[in-house]
Amino acid sequence: MAKQWEQEWGGKCFWSFGSTRSKGVAIKLNPKYRFQIEHFEFDNDGRFFVLDLKHSETSIHVLNVYAPNKNLERTTWLKQLSKWLSGSKNLLVGGDFNFVENTLIDKIGGNRTYGNSGSDIFCKYKQDFCLFNPFRNKFPSKVETT
């Protein structure tokens, strides 16, 4: 199925498959851009992959994640991410972290005291690796989910 999707897309695709009903991450590279693939690594659990790309003179380190949805498992899992974030390349981090940083503005409905387990770990990563959320930079107090 993956090869078929890649053929239909017309560009290169990268995957880390999970189970039928959970996990799994993917990225499709736009066929209009010519990226040089420097490194690709994924886990066997469908939780993440890292992809090192080069376009012109720019190197990009892509990390795509699907964090566990159970609090304890997620916080334990997040603690091991730093090894995939370190390095001198530009970082592009995305995916589903299964937490919200600020339950007042990043969450609509539900229990406001639940859902941010792991955000403290990721906030430290944001400081250590100069990461930012482009949406929150543009709309710092807008109540919205992304």
Image: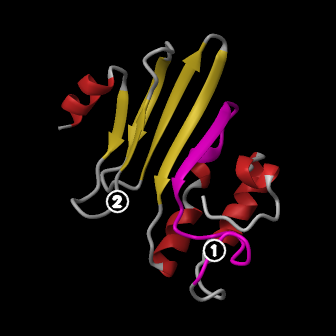
Residue pointed to by mark 1 = 107
Q: Residue at x 37, y 21 (%)?
A: 11
Q: Is residue 67 visible?
A: yes
Q: Is 120 covered by the magenta stretch?
A: no
Q: Residue at x 50, y 71 (%)?
A: 74
Residue pointed to by mark 2 = 23
Q: CA distance from mark 1 to mark 2?
A: 22 Å
Type of amino acid at the residue the image marks with label 1: Lys
Of helix, strand and loop, which mostly describes the magenta segment? loop
- The front one of 5 and 42 is 5
| 6 left or right, relative to 110 | left
Element assignment for label 1: loop
Could you say where residue 42 lies in the image, as x and y percent from the top left? 38, 43
Could you say where residue 131 lies in the image, as x and y percent from the top left? 73, 48
Numbered label tally:
2
Q: Residue at x 62, y 10 (%)?
A: 56
Could you say where residue 30 lies in the image, as x and y percent from the top left? 46, 23
Q: Examine the rendered structure and indicate whether residue 6 appears above or below residue 144.
A: above
- The front one of 89 and 14 is 14
- Label 2: how many residues lie within 10 Å, few (<14), some (14-19) or many (20+)? some
For the C terminus, the image quarter is bottom right
| 96 left or right, relative to 139 | left
For the N terminus, the image quarter is top left
| Location of residue 27 (image quadrant) | top left
Type of amino acid at the residue the image marks with label 2: Lys
- Label 1: how many residues lie within 10 Å, few (<14), some (14-19) or many (20+)? many
Q: Residue at x 77, y 64 (%)?
A: 142
Q: Is residue 133 visible?
A: no
Q: Is 85 covered by the magenta stretch?
A: yes
Span colored in magenta: 84-109
Element assignment for label 2: loop
Instruction: Tell us which disc is closer to us: 1 or 2.
Output: 1
